[in-house]
């Protein structure tokens, strides 16, 4: 398997690079591109969804971005150790009816030795907002 740099163990610099790479990829809203950062057998908990494997990740992301329109994400590193990271995030999106939301929460990430994410556990809350109250553009 190819390496996906940066690889663990992380330093402050490489942890920040990994978080920025994730933010950049997710903002493409391209399930194929995003899924390539995860191991073939990746394990996720996203809200109440339990997702196993890269193919399920792709299907999940496709459904997500069909619902969450004009999605825009910001991630922030909160901590790291060896091959694990804690990340805070917020993103804004609107539904088909035009209602805007800010979704925010925390993720726990674990990477394999090649730099692919093997575990992602996300806790997420949604807040309905007015379009004028958006922070992310």
Image: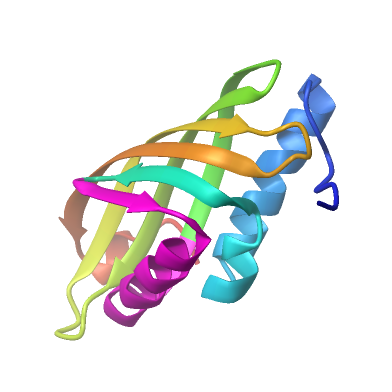
Magenta-drawn segment: 48-72
Image color mode: rainbow
Left or right side of 86 for 16: right
Q: Is residue 112 visible?
A: yes
Q: Position of residue 113 (x, y in %)?
A: 76, 31
Rendered position, 47 above or below 16: below
**The magenta stretch spans residue 54:** yes
Q: Is residue 30 visible?
A: no
Between 98 and 118, the one lying in front of the other is 118
Between 94 and 64, the one lying in front of the other is 64
Task: Name which residue lies at 47% across and 67% down.
Answer: 55
Task: Name which residue lies at 49% across and 37% down.
Answer: 119
Left or right side of 101 for 6: right
Left or right side of 122 for 97: left
Between 99 and 5, the one lying in front of the other is 5
Between 31 and 43, the one lying in front of the other is 43
Quarter residue 64 falls in: bottom left
Quarter residue 83 falls in: top right
Q: Position of residue 23 (x, y in %)?
A: 60, 53
Task: Name which residue lies at 65% across and 62% down.
Answer: 36
Q: Position of residue 58 (x, y in %)?
A: 47, 70
Hey, which residue is sitting farthest bottom in the picture?
Answer: 96
Rendered position, 135 above or below 111: below
**The magenta stretch spans residue 113:** no
């Amino acid at each position: 398997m190819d390496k996906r740099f940066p690889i663990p163990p992380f330093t402050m610099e490489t942890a920040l690079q990994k978080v920025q790479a994730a933010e950049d990829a997710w903002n493409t809203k391209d399930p194929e591109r995003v899924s390539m950062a995860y191991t073939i057998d990746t394990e996720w908990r996203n809200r109440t969804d339990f997702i196993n494997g890269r193919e399920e990740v792709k299907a999940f992301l496709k459904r997500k971005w069909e619902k969450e329109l004009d999605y825009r994400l910001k991630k922030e590193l909160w901590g790291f150790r060896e091959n694990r990271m804690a990340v805070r995030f917020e993103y804004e999106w609107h539904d088909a009816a035009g209602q805007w939301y800010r979704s925010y929460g925390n993720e726990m990430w674990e990477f394999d030795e090649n730099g692919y994410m093997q575990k992602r556990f996300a806790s997420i809350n949604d807040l309905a907002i007015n379009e004028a109250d958006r922070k992310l553009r």
